[in-house]
Structures are given as C-alpha cells and as structure tokens.
Image (spheres, rainbow, N blue to C red):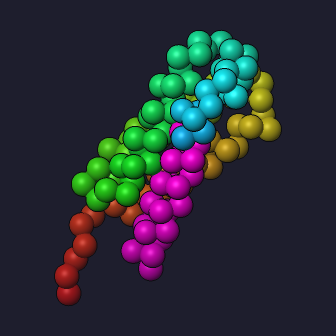
Amino acid sequence: MKQLIQTSLWILLGIIFLFAGGSKLWDPTAHAEEFAHWGYPLWFVYVTGTIEVLGGIGLFVPAGRLYGVLLLSLTMIGASVTHLRAGEMGAFPVPVVLLLALLTLAWTMRYPKRTP
C-alpha cells in the first residue's frame, strides 16, 4: 500500500509541477501581472518556473526524488506566504495541499524497503 501511495504521489506531483513550471517558462507574460501584484519582478517568473520544472523532473528520477521534494516544498511554503500576504485566501489552499502531498511523499520515503 505504501508503494502505491508513493508511486501515485510522485507521478501526480511530477506532472503537476512540470505543467505549472512549464506554463511559466512557455508564456511568462501570462503570469507577469500576478507576480507584479505580489511585488515580484518579471525575472522571478522564470526562476519559479525553472524551480518547478526541475523539481518535477527530480520527482521522476529516483536518485533526485528527495531533492525534488525539498525544492518544491520550499517553493510551496513561499507560495503559501505570498498568497497570505496578498490576502488571497481563495488561492491559499492550493500550495498548502501541494505542500501536504509533498510532505506525505517525503514521509513514505523515510525508510528504505525492507526485504522479508
């Protein structure tokens, strides 16, 4: 059961972050107004998109999975704080749910497989 949860989470989260980061890199101007509203410069769209894509790729590579989880968790903490500071309570749950999913994935990775 643990293996099913772990596999499902890294695939789902990997896809989510690849698409989220990819959209920022593909068309950064579509996100520029949001980032400006939050007080971030346009170049930060590229940074965030790159982090999300690299973290998403990391989730698909077993040796990089923990690094992907850590990188994306820090990013989701930043996104949560950003939404709180901006008073965007409707958007706040999204990064929190993603953070909880990432932490669940980290929890399932905490011990290596045991062979009977």
Q: Position of residue 110 (x, y in %)?
A: 31, 59
Q: Position of residue 33 (x, y in %)?
A: 73, 20
Number of marks in the image?
0
Which quarter of the figure is the N terminus placed in? bottom left
Q: Is residue 45 above or below residue 67?
A: above
Report the residue that reaches farthest toward the left.
Answer: 115
State yes or no: residue 18 in magenta.
Answer: yes
Which quarter of the figure is the C terminus placed in? bottom left
Is 63 displayed left or right of 16 in the figure? Answer: left
Residues shaded magenta: 1-21
Is 90 displayed left or right of 41 in the figure? Answer: right
Q: Residue at x 66, y 24 (%)?
A: 29
Q: Residue at x 60, y 39 (%)?
A: 23
The dominant secondary structure in magenta is helix
Q: Residue at x 51, y 29 (%)?
A: 48
Q: Is residue 115 above or below residue 56?
A: below
Q: Nearer the viewer, residue 67 or 2?
A: 67
Residue 91 appearing in the image:
yes
State yes or no: residue 83 in magenta.
Answer: no
Report the residue that reaches farthest toward the bottom.
Answer: 116
Report the residue that reaches farthest toward the front.
Answer: 26
Dividing the picture into quadrants, the one containing residue 106 is: bottom left
Q: Position of residue 94 (x, y in %)?
A: 67, 44
Residue 74 appearing in the image:
no
Q: Nearer the viewer, residue 89 or 24?
A: 24
Q: Position of residue 38 (x, y in %)?
A: 68, 18
Q: Is residue 94 above or below residue 3?
A: above
Q: Residue at x 24, y 54 (%)?
A: 63
